[in-house]
Structure formats: structure tokens, C-alpha cells
Image: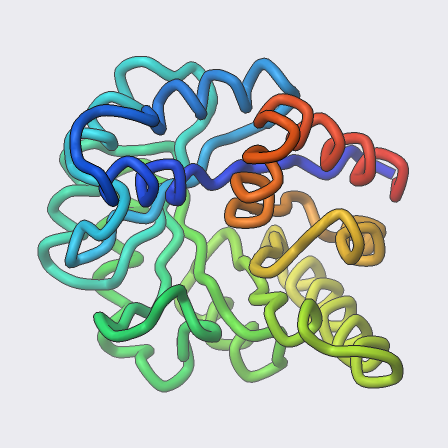
């Protein structure tokens, strides 16, 4: 079974920096440490309100980090222009509402098909690998197929917050959606709410090629350091395979 890649989301290093202003802590330094600890990629979400990652952060990540950058973005003209200008390795299209604390659920790729079609096409034409952050359902996977997205990232929030039989059912839902995506030539990724305690069953799904994890790793880094936090997650993911 192939190795599952780990993408480390550094948004909340920027959240801490922005709470006080200035340059510390530096999310680009966090990306460097994550790379040294075994991360395979860096994820950063440039939100409309710039509540954490800023335009300057994206510029520096593109210039200073050797790992692939996965730019999370809403399907808006502003974010499309930024993505086309920087041309990161990947662009993950996510739903975004100004009042939410974090991304709450997956993108409705089926319901927003007409809006997403030109965005996906322009990113693809620019050589940016498009990912859609969706719920693990047949309807959303089928929409991703019709949109021509090479990657989907399944929202694992419901799994992460469920317990007992409900968690087992959510895990089965993700596994089934990953198998469907792979059958249709789409590379499945997953993320949201993953921790040391719940990551192994998700990492063990054979079709899932990458996990993107941020908030938990940054929170754990307060107590253990970022390198220790990332290495531990890397070890758990490797053990699952």
C-alpha cells in the first residue's frame, strides 16, 4: 500500500501572529519546520477577510518553501486572480462564509456546478492542480467527475466529532466515497478535525493519498513543539499503512 502524504496547514500560526500584530510567530518558519519534520506539503487558506494567512504570506511561501503549496480558496474572482498569478502546486476550492470560525462542511459542488465550471477550467489551464473540498457523498463525487477535478478532499468533520456506531458509519461513508472517486480517476484526500486519536482509521483507507491537518497540529505544538507534533502524526499515518 502506498504512503499517505501529510499536508500541514499553517493558518493558525498566522492567527496567533495577527492577534498581536507584527511578524511573530512566522507561518513561513512553521512551514520550514513542518517540512523538516516530515510534511509532504503545506496548506494555507487565504480568506476574503485575511483573518489569518495574508497575501504576503502566500508570496513568501511560494518563494521560500520547497514543498508543494496547496492554496485553499473560495471560488471568487479575487481568489481566482490571486491563484492564477501565483500558480501554486494545487488550489483546493472550499466554501467560505465570513461569519464562520472555520470551514463548516464541504463545498456543494453539485449545487454550484455552473459557478465552479469556469473556475476549475481556468485553474486547470494555468497548470494548477484543482481539488474540491466536498462531503463524502456519491452526489458530490459525481459532480467532481463532471467538473473534471483531478482531486477531491473529503470533509472529515462529522467523522471527527462522532462517537461509537455513528463514527463507524461516517468512516464507512468516507471509505465508500474514496473508492468511488478512485474508480473514476480522481485522487481522494481528506481533512478537518483529525487528531492523534482519530487519524489512523482515515489514514488506513487505501485510496486516500493525502491528509491535510492544521489546527490540531498547531495546538499540540504549543505543548510539544511543531516538529514533535508533525513527526508524531507522520508516524501514526505510516503505521496505518
Q: Residue at x 53, y 59 (%)?
A: 152
Residue 120 placement: quadrant: bottom left
Does residue 240 lie above or below 103 as drawn?
above
Which coloring applies here? rainbow
Judge by depth and name the residue closer to the eye, 184 or 20. Answer: 20
User: Whole-percent x and y of residue 214?
Assistant: 52, 45
Does residue 132 lie above or below 43 as drawn?
below
- In which quadrant is the C terminus drawn? top right
Q: Residue at x 62, y 34 (%)?
A: 223
User: Whole-percent x and y of residue 238?
Assistant: 83, 34
Q: Is residue 148 left or right of residue 176?
A: left
Q: Is residue 125 left or right of residue 39?
A: left
Q: Residue at x 32, y 13 (%)?
A: 64
- In which quadrant is the N terminus drawn? top right
Judge by depth and name the residue closer to the eye, 108 or 17. Answer: 17
**Number of marks in the image?**
0
Residue 167 placement: quadrant: bottom right
Does residue 8 lie above or below 142 as drawn?
above
Q: Is residue 187 visible?
A: yes
Residue 108 placement: quadrant: bottom left
User: Whole-percent x and y of residue 71?
Assistant: 34, 43
Q: Residue at x 36, y 67 (%)?
A: 101
Does residue 32 lie above or below 147 as drawn?
above
Q: Is residue 90 visible?
A: no
Amino acid at each position: 500500500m502506498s504512503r499517505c502524504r501529510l499536508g500541514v496547514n499553517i493558518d493558525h500560526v498566522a492567527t496567533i501572529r495577527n492577534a498581536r500584530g507584527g511578524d511573530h510567530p512566522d507561518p513561513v518558519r512553521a512551514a520550514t519546520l513542518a517540512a523538516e519534520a516530515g510534511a509532504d506539503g503545506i496548506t494555507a487558506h487565504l480568506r476574503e477577510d485575511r483573518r489569518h494567512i495574508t497575501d504576503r504570506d502566500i508570496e513568501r511561501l511560494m518563494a521560500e518553501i520547497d514543498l508543494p503549496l496547496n492554496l485553499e480558496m473560495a471560488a471568487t474572482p479575487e481568489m481566482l486572480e490571486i491563484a492564477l498569478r501565483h500558480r501554486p502546486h494545487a488550489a483546493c476550492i472550499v466554501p467560505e462564509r465570513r461569519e464562520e470560525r472555520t470551514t463548516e462542511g464541504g463545498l456543494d459542488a453539485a449545487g454550484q456546478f455552473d459557478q465552479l465550471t469556469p473556475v476549475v477550467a481556468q485553474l486547470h489551464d494555468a497548470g494548477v492542480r484543482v481539488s474540491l473540498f466536498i462531503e463524502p457523498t456519491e452526489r458530490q463525487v459525481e459532480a467532481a467527475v463532471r467538473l473534471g477535478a483531478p482531486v477531491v478532499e473529503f470533509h472529515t468533520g462529522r467523522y471527527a466529532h462522532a462517537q461509537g456506531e455513528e463514527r463507524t458509519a461516517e468512516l464507512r461513508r468516507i471509505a465508500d466515497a474514496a473508492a468511488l472517486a478512485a474508480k473514476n480517476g480522481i485522487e481522494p484526500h481528506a481533512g478537518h478535525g483529525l487528531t492523534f486519536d482519530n487519524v489512523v482509521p482515515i489514514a488506513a483507507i487505501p485510496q486516500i493519498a493525502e491528509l491535510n491537518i492544521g489546527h490540531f497540529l498547531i495546538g499540540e505544538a504549543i505543548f510539544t513543539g511543531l516538529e514533535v507534533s508533525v513527526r508524531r502524526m507522520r508516524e501514526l499515518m505510516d503505521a496505518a499503512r
